[in-house]
Amino acid sequence: MTVDVLEIGDALAQYDPVMGLEVHVELNTKSKMFCGCPTVFGAPPNTQTCPVCLGLPGALPVVNARAVESAIKIGLALNCEIAEWCRFARKNYFYPDMPKNFQTSQYDEPIAYNGWTEVAVPSGDGGTEFYRIEIERAHMEEDTGKSTHVGGATGRIHGASHSLVDYNRAGIPLIEIVTKTIEVPAEKAAAVARAYVSMLRDLLLALDVSDVRMDQGSLRCDANVSLKPKGSPVLGTRTETKNVNSFRSVERAITYEITRQAAVLSSGGKVVQETRHWHEDTGITTSGREKSDAEDYRYFPEPDLVPVAPSREWVEEIRSSLPEAPSLRRVRLQEAWSFTDLEMRDVVNGNALEPIVKTVELGVTPAAAKKWWLGELARAANESGQDLDALGVGPAEVAEVQKLVDAGSLNDKLARQVFDGLVKGEGTPAEIIEKRGLALVSDDSALIEAIDRAIAANPDVVEKVNSGKPAAAGALIGAVMKDMRGQADAAKVRELLNAKLGI
């Protein structure tokens, strides 16, 4: 499908983008928001359900206390005010993935509100710029089930022959974090959005309230975007791109919506207020459904749940238990790791901070951990259009490979091949080394035989060495490494060669 878009430079020359971001966070509680069903990801369909989360007549919900505590943690970490009294509401709509035909959420009385945070974005001169993001609210609700549309070409309901619904996810605790209107320099909009979602992921990991696996949907972003003519105070009509589930996709989806809406407006058309779907493969959004306003959901207080009234003592107890703020932690880690400002910025912008932290905790030096995460693995992620955490390679594998390098069983060249195998799902590092035959040759006799062959094949080089030019031996080392297909320790080869030539 072909859609008219403007070049991003032309779009930003005419219009200023305005954003609002809604980030949905699945909490890592062991049970659901209002019942005792487990929340294990990947269980067989419809095996983690009960009368409460299926909305059967007569079933009564009970609030998950751990979820309330997690909501307060998130609110405090985002500098929000914590409500002394709040309650749940019914958000009424029909869709097959919501078996009750309403979602238990919070409407005008959220548990956390009126907060703020800051995000860091690279500046054009190699420095860093900070932008303040105002938080409207962070409220509690439950997730919906998962629909799978079968028989169509796109995997969406249009054109499908039938749909399957898995209610395991229905009722899992969610926190929805909603920003106020975000207006930043036009050229920074998409980057600020990406930085904000990335910052939230780091924060939520530090709070230990979610596993924030974007590939599994436990952290996802709805991006509201509108355009207004340069210099105009009047906001344009917004669209909401739903369930964007990677940092890269957040940036790409917002950029695309800017170019698409700019093309509509510049041709004299009107932007339709609607939800839109992001297509990772084609890099475009497509129309979903006309966007509902709050009154369309017929909110009213949930009659089956008592209000939530966290005591001030409990709130302060939670506040005192909050971990180190991610921004302060980054400063401390940078100093401990002896990284330059530019190196640390690359780590943060590459979403490699947490993987490097965990790899260092497993005994790898910070420099070596950064080398692999920002080198080989970042390259693989870029080539596949994924984020690092979706590659399927974790800190344990990186640490195992580096320890093999440290032990002399691999060199960097062979280690890169091991990482290639890990990304391709060929097994553990040990299995890949065996399958691909990557282990370094440690047998001195085999290395000496290769050295003898190199000496015999390069008498002119040997003559240069013997005439007082020991640096010429580098060519012999290269010949040995080629003979051994790179599976030799260059330092060991140099040691044996020097002994052979009497250097």
Image: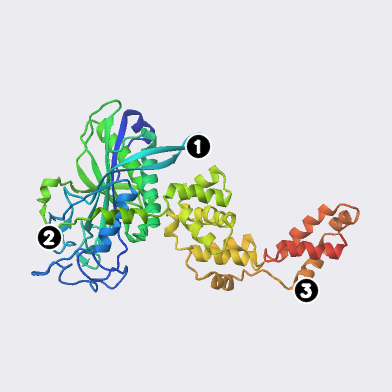
CA distance separating discs 1 and 2: 50 Å
Q: Quadrant of residue 391?
A: bottom left
Q: Can you say whether 422 is above or below 334 in the image?
A: below
Q: Could you say where residue 365 lies in the image, as x and y percent from the top left?
A: 59, 58
Coloured how? rainbow
> Mark 3 or 1, which is nearer the eye?
1
193 horizontally vs 157: left or right: right
Quadrant holding the C terminus: bottom right
Q: Can you say whether 433 is above or below 135 in the image?
A: below
276 horizontally vs 320: left or right: left
Question: Mark 1 vs mark 2: which is more N-terminal?
Answer: 2
**Residue at (30, 68) in percent of width and height:** 30
**Mark 3: which amino acid?**
Ser
The circle on residue 127 is 1
Secondary structure state at the residue bearing disc 3:
helix
Q: Circle 2 sits on which residue? A: 101
**Mark 2: which amino acid?**
Asn
Tell whether label 1 touches label 3 (CB within 8 Å): no
- Numbered circles on residues, count: 3
Secondary structure state at the residue bearing disc 1:
loop
Q: Circle 3 sits on which residue? A: 445
Of residues 494 and 61, the one nearer the viewer is: 61
